[in-house]
Amino acid sequence: MRSALRRATAARRRRHKSGMPADYAMVPPFPRGGWNAHQPPFPETAPTTQLTTLPSGLRVVSQETHTYMSAIGVVITGGAADEKAHLGTVGGAQLAEVCAWRGTRNSSTADVLKRAEACGAYLHANAQREQTLYCIDALRDKLEDATQLLAEACLLGPDLEAPGAMDEVREGMDLVFLDATQDARVRENIHAAAYGSSPLGAPLLCPPSQLHTLSPKTLADFRALITQPQSLVVAGAGVGHDELIELAEKHFEPHL
């Protein structure tokens, strides 16, 4: 009896030193199934990727993941290299990225951010040399508003003709160049050294010496170049395929 008590006391002391409660039997057990005990049941088969090409040439790709959040993006086969090859300009691709969520001719930046907040959305845009991406993650029941925001960001863009708008954008791009990480600067120099004056040597970050050449027409010409229906893919995860087709037809095709 005494040896059993000694063993129990020693075990209690070890648990106390390790941070475990002395009387761990009083700690309520964790619910079986954890946080997803009430999650809707998953299908018996794994999700599949579905692809539909609309009559305009716009492609719609989706995968139903049965989650509470949905992600919708637009992948465009065009970027800084295409701008240099076809337009002979530099900075339009970065301009499209910087201006993605700055509003449209019908709504201000504050309006866009307010609508995004109402969707529980995370906004993202990225321009590379051979592709451009716009993406929005939103609550599943707010897909209608989220898709409209995405289409406006990709196809309409802000009103850069407004007084001071272009100067504000140039200042922002200048700060982006100055704040670029060392890795980003090294990659820019590697591309310039490897590809020289060819399209793939085009910079992703507009040099400060070229900022004065940017204008509203630079952005308009770049958008017109890359936003052809056959160059766009509307992709979604956590959304039904038929629903995504309907959203693409409603919010994207009228602007193409």
Image (cartoon, rainbow, N blue to C red):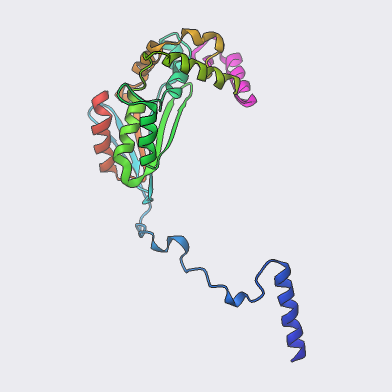
Q: Position of residue 27 (x, y in %)?
A: 57, 73
Left or right for 6, reference 52: right
From which residue to which does the magenta span run? 180-203
- From the viewer's side, name the closer residue of 80 and 50: 80
Q: Is residue 29 visible?
A: yes
Left or right for 140, reference 28: left
Q: The C terminus lies in which quarter of the figure?
A: top left
Image position of 189 with respect to 50: above or below: above
- From the viewer's side, name the closer residue of 241 and 255: 255
Image position of 147 with respect to 45: above or below: above
| Magenta stretch holds residue 183 | yes
Query: In which quarter of the view is residue 97 placed?
Result: top left
Q: Is residue 231 visible?
A: no
Task: Specify the principal SS of the magenta part.
Answer: helix
Q: Position of residue 123 (x, y in %)?
A: 43, 34
Image position of 37 with respect to 197: above or below: below
Q: Residue at x 59, y 16 (%)?
A: 194
Left or right for 127, reference 9: left
Q: Residue at x 36, y 13 (%)?
A: 161
Q: Position of residue 157 (x, y in %)?
A: 36, 22
Query: In which quarter of the view is residue 86 placed?
Result: top left
Query: In which quarter of the view is residue 99 placed?
Result: top left
Q: Position of residue 148 (x, y in %)?
A: 30, 33
| Magenta stretch holds residue 181 | yes
Q: Residue at x 39, y 42 (%)?
A: 120
